[in-house]
Image (spheres, rainbow, N blue to C red):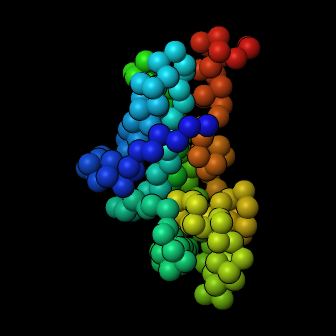
């Protein structure tokens, strides 16, 4: 796996007028195309995930305090994760897809939040929204709708379908 080293904060700032869905698609495209220019013979897969809540877009928290603020805002509310994937060859996008999931956090207590943050720093510092559903973050939620793989950050089923269609993986 290669890191595109894309300055996501700078890129997001330049895309701020777009919807969260379009921002995720554009960031995935920028990542795939950047690596694809360096490895023109390969199919490069780029991905990105954006959390949309009301009129806000959330980033990965920089600290425990940031995570606590994010989770407090999302508590007892529904937000949407937009997970995009882009495939590029020779510096140009050849396919993209965006899946989404709607997640409703339960109305947890301040004590629960503190306990969650004490026990899961790797979860909340490495994930948009300050949680990993597949880890301890599942305890934050009461309802989940949509593509599970969108929550994990990569719409696997559409991607596998595209790779089969192109003959890159067996069908």
Residue 96 x/y as whole percent: 47, 28
- Asked if residue 36 can be seen in this view, the reply is yes
Q: Which residue is at a point 45% across and 45% down the rendered structure image? A: 5
Q: Residue furthest front?
A: 38
- Location of residue 142 (image quadrant): bottom right
Relative height, residue 164 to residue 8 (above, below)? above
Q: Work out whether residue 90 or residue 114 is closer to the camera in this orientation and state it.
A: 90
Q: Residue furthest top?
A: 167
Q: Work out whether residue 22 or residue 102 is closer to the camera in this orientation and state it.
A: 22
- Asked if residue 142 can be seen in this view, the reply is no
- From the image, which quarter does the N terminus lie in? top right
- Location of residue 121 (image quadrant): bottom right
- From the image, which quarter does the C terminus lie in? top right
Relative height, residue 62 to residue 128 (above, below)? below
Q: Which residue is at a point 74% across and 14% down the rendered structure image? A: 170
Q: Which residue is at a point 65% across and 11% down the rendered structure image? A: 167
Residue 49 x/y as whole percent: 50, 48
72 lies left or right of 170: left
Residue 87 x/y as whole percent: 50, 26
Q: Work out whether residue 114 or residue 73 is closer to the camera in this orientation and state it.
A: 114
Q: Which residue is at a point 72% across and 56% down the rendered structure image? A: 134
Q: Residue furthest bottom?
A: 111
Relative height, residue 31 to residue 72 (above, below)? above
Relative height, residue 138 to residue 171 (above, below)? below
Residue 154 x/y as whole percent: 60, 40
151 lies left or right of 128: right
Q: Count of labels shown?
A: 0
Q: Work out whether residue 116 or residue 39 is closer to the camera in this orientation and state it.
A: 39
């Amino acid at each position: 796996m290669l890191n595109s080293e894309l300055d996501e904060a700078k890129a997001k700032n330049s895309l701020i007028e777009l919807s969260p869905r379009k921002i995720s698609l554009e960031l995935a495209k920028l990542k795939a195309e950047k690596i694809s220019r360096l490895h023109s013979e390969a199919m490069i897969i780029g991905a990105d995930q954006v959390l949309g809540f009301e009129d806000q877009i959330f980033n990965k928290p920089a600290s425990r305090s940031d995570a606590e603020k994010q989770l407090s805002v999302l508590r007892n509310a529904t937000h949407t994760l937009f997970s995009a994937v882009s495939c590029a060859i020779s510096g140009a996008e050849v396919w993209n897809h965006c899946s989404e999931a709607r997640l409703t956090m339960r109305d947890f207590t301040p004590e629960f939040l503190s306990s969650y943050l004490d026990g899961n720093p790797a979860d909340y510092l490495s994930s948009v929204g300050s949680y990993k559903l597949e880890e301890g973050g599942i305890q934050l939620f009461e309802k989940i709708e949509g593509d599970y793989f969108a929550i994990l950050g990569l719409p696997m089923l559409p991607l596998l379908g595209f790779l089969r269609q192109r003959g890159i993986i067996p069908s």
